[in-house]
Image (cartoon, rainbow, N blue to C red):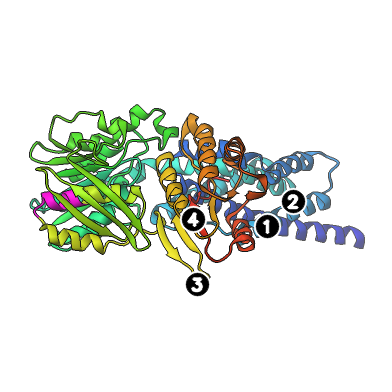
Amino acid sequence: MNTLMSFITVSVILLAVTGAAGVANLLMELKRDLMMMQQNSYRPERYMRWLRTSGDTTSWLRLTALVLFFLILLPYTGIVLGCACMLVLFLFNTLRLATAVYKKPLVWTPRARRIYAVAVAIAACASVAAWFLSRDWMFMAAFMLALYLLSHPIMMAAVIILKPVEAHINKGYYDDAARILRSMPDMKVIGITGSYGKTSTKHYLNRILSEQWEVLMTPGSYNTPMGVIRTVREMMKPYTEIFICEMGAKNIGDIKEICDLVHPDMGIITAVGEQHLESFKTIENVQRTKFELADAIPAEGFVLINNDFPYAASRQVDNTCALRYSIGDTGADFHATDIAYGKDGTRFTLHVPGGDAYRFDTRLVGECNISNLIPAIAIALRLGMPIEKVQSAVSRVEQVEHRLSMKHTPGRITIIDDAFNSNPHGSRMALDVLRAMDGGKRIIITPGMIELGDRQREANEAFGRHIAECADVAVIVGEYNRDAILAGLRDAGMPEERVHAVDTFAQAQKTLASIATPGDTVLYENDLPDTFK
């Protein structure tokens, strides 16, 4: 009898502990799923694409949980053995998730809290239903495994359930932002879009125009409709004279949606290139979307278009004044020549409509940064800013963090930080800057380029070949593009001893510490978020 009572006591305690561990594991797993959903813009289709490419649904932990679930349901699996196995799995995964460090951790916005609460409610309701159907504590413990295995569908269900609620909330925010903008009819609105370069252009334009006007720009990467709405509602002042609105897009119609809200008076299209092809599918769709900005400019306004990109140069604009700009003498309305790089920055000549030319000095380096400066200068001149004031402002423009910014360490190592984003055009320019460096080894640390659709492997192989031409040492991070980049490096004949393949940026830093010496230059090209391995 005592033995039986002891067994029952142990079983009850083990069931209780296993159940509590299962709840903690599920809460942590749902939190991680929410973080990945947030990084995919709360869009189930993007979340599904991440699931397909990440292998998260078939990880060894989930496969172990699946096998364990069926074993526990077999009649010969004892309660002690079953609970012990589940407990170990739950505790291991909970500890793993609790100690994980993410590049872009979950931000507990009101929307995130709503989604998490609904996901937890779904799991709780399912558990109650399972109890009334089974009335079996062992089955309920096993049911925690099932909830863990179904955490991804639970998270997607929570997002879908809340979709009408979020739409209603967002409609209220939209209407409020529209009201604020209508109350400021004299404010100039400048829209900026492009496959790349728009954030840097935005910062440069803000710096120049702030010399003469009260300017507001969308901060950080607030380039979605909700980001623009938040900027207007939280940051716009009654005395704001110019609003610089960055406009991002991953689907046709995204730019038009923002334009319908802010009604831009003038615009800049920085590039039309191979970016976000996973969602756009074709570069023609990219072109169509970026030029939604030009189509929204009124007849009395104007739009500046970067003619260095064929899909931008070939697109005609008839509804408003279209001015073209470029690097080099291509016949564009604004073009830069005599570009000279030095240790303190760059000097170039800008030719403007009417035949005049002005000399500019800037702390920025790289053709891409000069290309991003040109439309900022052009806007300032079109708005009537004196050339002397524009030249002075340009000389004080600071490099934008993580966008081909340059710094020097106390150990006399030069860091070129281009980690924010990477694309075929930008990566070539960044590598050209690296190639121009002398006095030591030229080292690149990169995980490659993403969101290029069917051209993903081809573009990264070409990237690898260009790395071999411009760098002395290559450190390739992660698995996502590793094979493609390594293939390109081999094709270009880069010696194997100069190539290092590592799994994480932490390992890349250790590798760098072992090979870097004073006088070396290190280029950080792209830094993938947690949704990519």
Q: Nearer the viewer, mark 4 or mark 2?
A: 4
Amino acid at dot 2: Met
Amino acid at dot 1: Ala
- Whether tag 3 and tag 4 are in contact, CB under 8 A, the answer is no
- Whether tag 3 and tag 2 are in contact, CB under 8 A, the answer is no
Q: Of the residues under marks 4 and 1, which one precedes in the sequence?
A: 1
Quarter holding the N terminus is bottom right
Magenta-drawn segment: 377-384
Q: Of the residues under marks 4 and 2, which one precedes in the sequence?
A: 2
Q: Of the residues under marks 1 and 2, which one precedes in the sequence?
A: 1
Helix, strand or loop at mark 3:
loop
Residue 463 visible (yes or no)? yes
Report which residue position mark 2 lands on.
86
Amino acid at dot 4: Lys
Task: Tell me, for residue 21, which label it has, or none.
Answer: 1
Q: Nearer the viewer, mark 3 or mark 1?
A: 3
Q: Is residue 169 left or right of residue 144?
A: left
Percent x, y of residue 14: 77, 58
Percent x, y of residue 420: 43, 52
Q: Kindly identify the residue that appears in the image at 54 percent across and 38 percent down.
A: 465
Q: Of the residues under marks 3 and 1, which one precedes in the sequence?
A: 1
Amino acid at dot 3: Pro
Q: Of the residues under marks 3 and 2, which one precedes in the sequence?
A: 2
Are there few (<14), some (14-19), or many (20+) residues within 10 Å of tag 2? many
Are there few (<14), some (14-19), or many (20+) residues within 10 Å of tag 4? few
Percent x, y of residue 231: 26, 55
Could you tell me how far apart the alpha carbons at marks 3 and 1 are, in whole angstroms?
A: 48 Å
Could you tell me how far apart the alpha carbons at marks 4 and 1 are, in whole angstroms?
A: 27 Å
Report which residue position mark 4 lands on.
104
Helix, strand or loop at mark 2:
helix
Helix, strand or loop at mark 4:
loop
- Whether tag 1 and tag 2 are in contact, CB under 8 A, the answer is yes
